[in-house]
Image (cartoon, coloured by chain):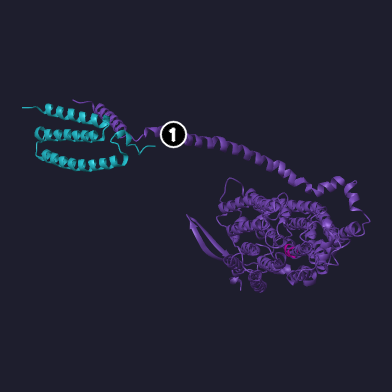
Chain colours: A cyan, B purple
Amino acid sequence: MLSVEQFLTLGAILFCIGLFGALTKRNIIIVLVSVELMLTAVNINLLTFARFGLTPSINGQIFTLFVMTIAAAEVAVGLAILIALYRNRNTSDVRDQDLMKW
Amino acid sequence: MVQNAWLIPLFPLVAYLLLFVLGRRAQEGIVTGISVLAALAGFIVSLLILSDVNANGAQAPYVFHWLTVGQHSLSMGYEVTPLNAMMLTVVTFISTLVLLFSKGYMHGDERYSVFYQYLNLFIFSMLGLVISPNLLQVYMFWELVGLCSFLLVGFWYFKPEAAAAAKKAFIVTRIGDVGLFIGIVLIYVATGTFEYSGVFEAFQAKKFAIDWITPDHLITLIGILVFIGAIGKSAQFPLHTWLPDAMEGPTPVSALIHAATMVAAGVYLVARAFPIFEASPDTLTVIGIIGGITAIFAALIGLTQNDIKRVVAYSTVSQLGYMVMALGVSAYTASTFHLMTHAFFKALLFLASGSVIHAIHHNQDLRKMGGLWKKLPLTGWTFLVGALALSGIPPFAGFWSKDEILLGAYNSGHYVLFTLALIAAFCTAFYIFRVFFMTFTGEFRGEKDVYDHAHESGPVMAIPLVLLSIMAIVVGFLNSPLMNNAFEHFLFKGGEEIGNVYEANWGMAGLATLVALLGIGLAYLMYKKQSIKPENLANGALRPLYQLSLNKFYVDELYHYVIVKPVVWIGHILNFIDKWIVDGIVHLFGEGTLIGSLGLKYSQNGQVQTYGLVTLVGAVLLIGFAMYAVGGVK
């Protein structure tokens, strides 16, 4: 039987990997993927507390389903934006997307 | 009829509003028509009121509640007493003629309609002042009169001298107004009312709500403060300097200011509020001395001025000095009577001067006039009437009133004031006939074609001159023994007598006439016969005195160096402090923010990942701080 610390550690590692990817990767697709990874880490946390929390219940699992659904929708929208961006600026480097500066 | 007195100021106000709505492109005829009709209507109502007062005497003021501030309740209203019935009639009569005269004088002026608007507002303010039953209302109209004089003196504002004169008139009278304002506030604090009647009662009972000063001193203090207002408005020494400069305005304005609307306000206030001054002998002494000094001072300056209007202006200052002096020696009737007669002959003199100036292309310099009698016979005759009235030659108006003032000064025992007034009378006769001879006799000293084109202007200018001449001849009889002192009986109808009244003294009358004739004779010798050359006197032994008089005793220069210059310097210092210290602090913050943001803007570099990193660092710091604050993770 895995303990609650192991689940939480997995979530934290996943979150950190995702965060690192989101903050450092140059390719905009990878950044999006990294964000998904962070969402997954959050899901693991939710599931962990739904099972091992102070008041275990099914709420956490249902919430996770919601997060997954919304993440899927978000990825669809995100990818569409990325494609539009790529068509306009002919690059997928996140550093080049800096129109909103001084 | 008396309850309809409020109509009188209403007429010019309505005329003002009408002209304002019609705009400045309104036809000259319509503009004049409306204004003259309004003033004429006011004059007719004034006459009706005058006859009513003559029959029934003074009546209680009509007062209505205006507003309540805390526990203080203020009222407005109007009143009719013999004194202000007389003033109403004089003001509306002269206003009507001045408005008519202006049609000729201002013909073709670009802002013709605006001129009439200002005149109407001016007349409204003065009439409002005259019928006010309380000091607060007086003060409001007092300031309105000041405003209108500013607008009218500076009517030709594109002339720098006119703009400066307007500013001077406003600022100098404002000095007096401050005194008046403090006086009125003190009166209200001390007596709890602004109404004349209430104030007079309190002054008689000497019961005041102020305890930091004895009642007697308070009465003197208030009297002098209120009188300072009159000094400013009635151009008494030492605040007389604005009035001669006010000659930069159009001549009809000068006539109105000098005869009816502006300078009369000061004397009127002192006369109306006379019980305030009468309660303190010290105040009366101050008033008498100031009046006496003004009378002789202005007369001496008038001797040598070369601008026709300036001479007449200084004669006004001098005559106002007479009136104020008369009040100071309690010759109340004489003073108010002189106020009335002076209004007629001074308006006449100004309008006649205006006619001369108009005829010779707006030249006012006496040295470029002469021999105009043949060209302007009517103006010459009317000016002569005005000059005789001013000099005090019987039977003209000025004789009767000036004689009474001299008599009052003599009988009250103020022999110094009496002597001053007598010398001033001599100077008055001299300088006004100097003007007369220099203008109408001898050879024309200006350009030839100006003389050839000089001619009388039409009936709109002639009618006022003739009417005023008639008044200047007959109005003096009102208070002569020949008419049983009708004016005096009228003035005190329905009320108690104020001040001293003396039996006519033929010796005094003879003396006054003799002095005036001497003045005229000297002017005749110097400027008509030329048997005494004025130039020889001016450049000979009397040169220092001549220069002193020509330069108006250097009062303007004195004010310039003692008051204006230091004030300008203080202004410069304050400007420096404001510009470099106050503004410096403000700019420090502004510039600091600007420079700081110039550097900070580079942090907004558009890199999403940088923003994310900064957010992360911030979140970690915040969480770390929160953990530390609650005592760490257990």
Q: Chain of mark 1?
A: B
Residue B282: horizontal and vertical position, in percent?
70, 50
SS at mark 1 in the image: helix
Residue B598: horizontal and vertical position, in percent?
44, 34
Left-right relation of A77 to B332 = left
Q: Main secondary structure of the magenta part?
A: helix
Residue A10: horizontal and vertical position, in percent?
14, 28
Please report the residue visible at 85 percent of the width from the left and 47 percent of the height from the top: B545
Q: Quadrant of residue B51?
A: bottom right
Please report the residue visible at 57 percent of the width from the left and 47 percent of the height from the top: B211
Bounds of the magenta segment: B339-343
For the residue marked with disc 1, what is the amino acid?
Leu
Please report the residue visible at 87 percent of the width from the left and 46 percent of the height from the top: B543
Q: Is residue A43 above or below residue B444?
A: above
Q: Which residue is mark 1?
A: B598
Residue B562: horizontal and vertical position, in percent?
71, 41
Q: Relative to the observer, which residue lies in front, B451 or B82?
A: B451
Q: Is residue B488 above or below residue B322?
A: below
Q: Relative to the observer, which residue lies in front, B12 or B79?
A: B12
Left-right relation of B590 to B361 = left
